[in-house]
Amino acid sequence: MLSEKEFLSAVSVHQNLIHKVCNLYAGSHHDREDLFQEILLNAWKGVSNFRGEAKFTTWLYRVALNTAITFFRKESKQPETKLVTGTIGAIADSQYQQDEQLSAVYMAISKLSGVDKALVMLYLDDYNYNDIGEILGISANNVAVKMNRIKTKLKEESKKYYQPV
């Protein structure tokens, strides 16, 4: 079990992963702050259950994702999504096109269910299927199947937001 000082130190070192979860699941700045506080509260309440069998980051990811999914399910909130575009005059055409593609992918990700968003986020953070399965409490094979379905879904969904010229 971690002491309060050890917990605060570990959370401080790994707060970026909490911010990633908040940015993915919460649309407004206010919602992100609320979710961040809720994740910290749940992590502190659950730290006594952390047995050290998994890495602290794995445990913290699980707490953060479960909190985010529950937080917005309870509140019946949907994250606000906006297509982000840059000023065309200041950006080279190729960079602008990349920004548009990236925005389309993020819009498509925002339409996924809570668990699917978590899978994508962990995949983009270079976690392997075994680690993702451990964090989410599912088998690595289930992760692989879900990721294949999600990739197909994202390709189709992102076409709605980006049409190359």
Image: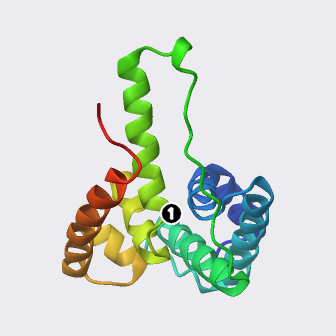
Looking at the image, residue 53 sits to the left or right of residue 24; the answer is left
How many residues crowd mark 1 within 10 Å: few (<14), some (14–19), many (20+)?
Answer: some
Q: Is residue 128 visible?
A: no
Residue at the spot 69% in from the left edge and 86% down from the top edge: 74
131 to 19, vertically: above or below: below
The quadrant holding residue 33 is bottom right
Which amino acid is tagged 1? Thr
Q: Position of residue 86 (x, y in %)?
A: 56, 27
- Colouring scheme applied when the structure was drawn: rainbow
Quadrant into which the C terminus falls: top left
18 to 44, vertically: above or below: above
Residue at the spot 51% in from the left edge and 74% down from the top edge: 62
Q: Secondary structure at mark 1?
A: helix
Comparing 25 with 96, the one in front is 96
Which residue in the rendered view is the most extreme toward the front? 165
Residue at the spot 62% in from the left edge and 73% down from the top edge: 68
Comparing 16 with 151, the one in front is 151
Residue at the spot 45% in from the left edge and 67% down from the top edge: 117
Q: Position of residue 75 (x, y in %)?
A: 73, 82
Q: Position of residue 69 (x, y in %)?
A: 58, 78
Q: Position of residue 144 (x, y in %)?
A: 20, 72
Q: Which residue is mark 1?
A: 57
